[in-house]
Amino acid sequence: MSAGNIASSPLPVIAIDGPSASGKGTVAALVACELGFHYLDSGAIYRATAHAARQGGIALEDEAGLVELAHRIELRFDGVEVYLNGAAVGDVIRTEEAGRAASSIAARPALRAALLQRQRAFRQPPGLVSDGRDMGSVVFPDATLKVYLTASAEERAQRRYKQLIEKGFDANLTDLLQDLRDRDTRDAARAAAPLRQSADAALLDTTSLTIAQAVARVLRWYREGLDQAAT
Ligand code: C5P
């Protein structure tokens, strides 16, 4: 395993990037729990910012307005709940529509820059597991371990479908698959921090893995890296 940069990292970070609905959030949260590390769901920051823009009447194309908003909003995480200016928004920001809005504002380089420090502030002792699109490439380029976690589009659509139905939301598999493909294309094609596997990230294809297997793989890579750094 050559991913990451164990020896020189001041505080360990495991950066897990990948496309929508790949399961990276679930895996990242479980790895964090196992190691007793903090967890950052960076997608929730983009989703909550897009939600705040809607609430504040700021157009998703208004980059200067979004930047000003990004500096102004108060965001707090408590377990799976997300608080935007004190109000719980965990459910409203997880809809497909909120995902599309997040993906739209996430293409704005000035907004990404405005959210950088907010994300880096999560790097606290004893360590951090973060998931997103640019955790290893931009936000934590010196991450201890970088993982690119993916699965086939069909498998991801199935997983998202199950998740939505379990939560009592309406869902249509064909629409979900199209939506995922559109979002992948937009996230990969944008100029600012596009979604792609960086050269120093380890590929984890979870199409035929269980969550537990994916978590075990990440933990093994992390521990092997620590062992290597110690010898
Ligand atoms: O991961 P999640 O689906 O919650 O992210 C929502 C959207 O936010 C993504 O489609 C992507 O456009 C954007 N995002 C990003 N960079 C991140 C995390 C999310 O551009 N680090």
Image (cartoon, helix red, strand yellow):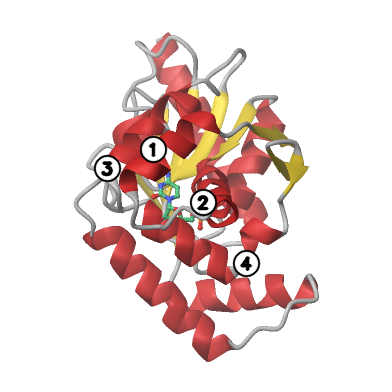
- In this picture, residue 180 sits left or right of residue 78: left
Q: Amino acid at mark 2?
A: Ala
Residue nearest the viewer, comparing 148 with 57:
57
Q: Amino acid at mark 1?
A: Val
Label 2 vs label 1: CA separation? 10 Å
Find residue 109 and name its label.
Answer: 3
**Residue at image coords 51%, 63%:** 99
Q: Earlier in the sequence, mark 2 or mark 1?
A: 2
Mark 1 or mark 3, which is nearer to you?
Answer: 1
**Residue at image coords 63%, 60%:** 94
Mark 3 or mark 2, which is nearer to you?
Answer: 2
What crowding class fits label 4: few (fewer than 14 Cα within 10 Å), some (14-19), or many (20 or more)?
few
Label 3 vs label 4: CA separation? 24 Å
- Residue receiving disc 2: 53
Mark 1 or mark 4, which is nearer to you?
Answer: 1
- In this picture, residue 94 sits left or right of residue 22: right
Q: Is residue 209 above or below residue 47?
A: below
- Residue receiving disc 4: 95
Label 1 vs label 3: CA separation? 10 Å
Find residue 158 and name its label.
Answer: none
Give percent across and percent down for residue 97: 55, 70
Q: Amino acid at mark 3?
A: Pro
Q: Would residue 64 be seen by someone viewing this image from the given angle?
A: yes
Label 1 vs label 4: CA separation? 23 Å
> Label 3's element?
helix
